[in-house]
């Protein structure tokens, strides 16, 4: 199963975001899975995480050689959704390069709907597990 996880660092704790598993269709794209930091996630957080996931997913070029590999990226977003930076923190170098390429190809994500959502996603960690 291919997954993308989102994490955000807040006060030395990592928060996991939003549960979303999409069925595998061919071997074309990674499918996001994210978990919420609480048992009752904000609908706005869930919706925004899905927007980010689908934007990256649409640009990701999946290869069979990525199966079983992982990559952790750190994203920095501006308040307007502009990608300010992305870097690999760990994982398979080839998969990380593909994940960085897909993320930078998006460049402009939808703007977070409010400050609370921005605070959650401004320094997010993306975990690609394929």
Image (tube, rainbow, N blue to C red):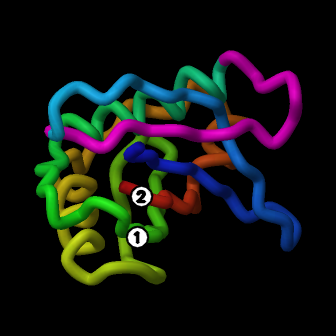
State which quadrant residue 118 falls in: top right
* Label whose residue precedes the other's in the sequence (2 or 1): 1
| Residue 40 on the magenta span | yes
Residue contact at pointers 2 and 1, CB within 8 angstroms: yes
Give the percent coordinates (x, y) of residue 34. Answer: 59, 40
Q: Residue at left 27%, top 55%?
A: 103
What secondary structure is the stretch in magenta mostly built from?
loop
What secondary structure is found at the residue carrying circle 2? strand
Q: Quadrant of the C terminus?
A: bottom left
Mark number for residue 71? 1
Give the percent coordinates (x, y) of residue 98. Answer: 18, 65
Q: Residue at left 29%, top 72%?
A: 96
Does 70 appear above or below 129? below
Total label count? Answer: 2
Residue ranking furthest to the top: 43
Give the percent coordinates (x, y) of residue 49. Answer: 53, 34
- Cα gap from disc 2 to disc 1, whole angstroms: 5 Å
Q: Residue at left 85%, top 22%?
A: 40
Does 16 appear above or below 34? below
Tag 2: Cα neighbours inside 10 Å, few (<14), some, or many (≥20)?
many
Magenta segment? 28-43
State which quadrant residue 93 falls in: bottom left
State which quadrant residue 84 falls in: bottom left
Give the percent coordinates (x, y) of residue 83. Answer: 34, 55
Q: Quadrant of the N terminus?
A: top left
Identify the residue position indicated by label 2 in the image: 128
Q: Residue at left 73%, top 64%?
A: 9
């Amino acid at each position: 199963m291919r997954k993308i996880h989102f994490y955000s660092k807040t006060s030395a704790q990592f928060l996991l975001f939003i549960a979303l598993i999409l069925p595998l269709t061919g071997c074309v794209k990674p499918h996001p899975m994210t978990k919420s930091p609480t048992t009752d996630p904000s609908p706005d957080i869930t919706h925004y995480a899905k927007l980010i996931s689908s934007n990256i997913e649409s640009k990701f070029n999946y290869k069979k050689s990525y199966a079983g590999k992982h990559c952790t990226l750190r994203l920095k977003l501006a308040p307007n959704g502009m990608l300010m930076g992305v870097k690999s923190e760990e994982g398979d170098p080839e998969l990380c390069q593909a994940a960085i390429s897909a993320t930078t190809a998006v460049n402009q994500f939808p703007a977070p709907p409010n400050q609370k959502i921005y605070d959650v996603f401004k320094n997010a960690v993306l975990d690609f597990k394929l």
